[in-house]
Amino acid sequence: MKSSPTAVVAGIIKHDGKYLITKRFEKSHLGGMWEFPGGKIMTGESDPTALKREFKEEIGIDCDVGDLVYETTYHYPAISINIKFYDCKLLSGTPKPIECAEVKWIKRSELSQYEFPPSDTKLIEMLSTA
Ligand code: DGT
């Protein structure tokens, strides 16, 4: 029997008209790609709890977690994921690359210039034309 995909959550944090994106460590899965901050949900966590934990651990910020914007299941050769992207609001802190290679605030028009994982392609299209 096939195991179910790994549950992942990620946050779309828009502040002063810009989106917060983070770069994955070169050595990790999808290394060097840009993504929306987040990660795997740990056993027993709700989506918002997991997201808030990841924001704190990875980039040192506190956020409110709002609506689900986009969800997809994607099969990478190394892992199958079910990823949910939530609208989030920055509450406090300045994003720092604690558990990622880089953080950046970018304009909507710049989204297409960064390499995101293929599971994010549709979302990038949605945000770029929203
Ligand atoms: P760990 O505990 O070292 O496995 O790391 P976590 O829990 O920080 O999780 P991570 O980031 O390795 O897992 C997220 C998976 O989802 C990874 O295979 C990359 C994939 N992914 C695809 N698009 C995105 C995205 O926009 N954001 C995030 N955070 N992950 C994405």
Image: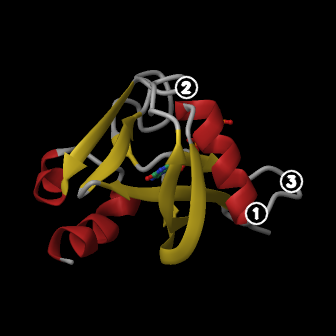
Foreground of the two, 70 or 20: 20
Q: Which residue is mark 3?
A: 43
Rendering quarter of residue 57: top right
**Disc 1 Cβ-to-ligand 1 distance below 8 Å:** no
The N terminus, quarter of image: bottom right
Q: Which residue is mark 2?
A: 99
Residue 27 x %, y %: 47, 21
Horizontal side of residue 46 vs 130, given as left or right:
right
**What's the colour scheme?**
secondary structure
Where disc 3 sits, the SS reads loop
**Disc 2 Cβ-to-ligand 1 distance below 8 Å:** yes
The C terminus, quarter of image: bottom left
Q: Could you classify mark 2 by the number of other residues whose Cα lies within 10 Å: few (under 14), some (14-19), or many (20 or more)?
A: some
Horizontal side of residue 79 vs 20, given as left or right:
right
Q: CA distance from mark 2 to mark 3?
A: 21 Å
Which residue is found at the position 22% from the left and 70% from the top? 125
Tag 1: amino acid? Ser
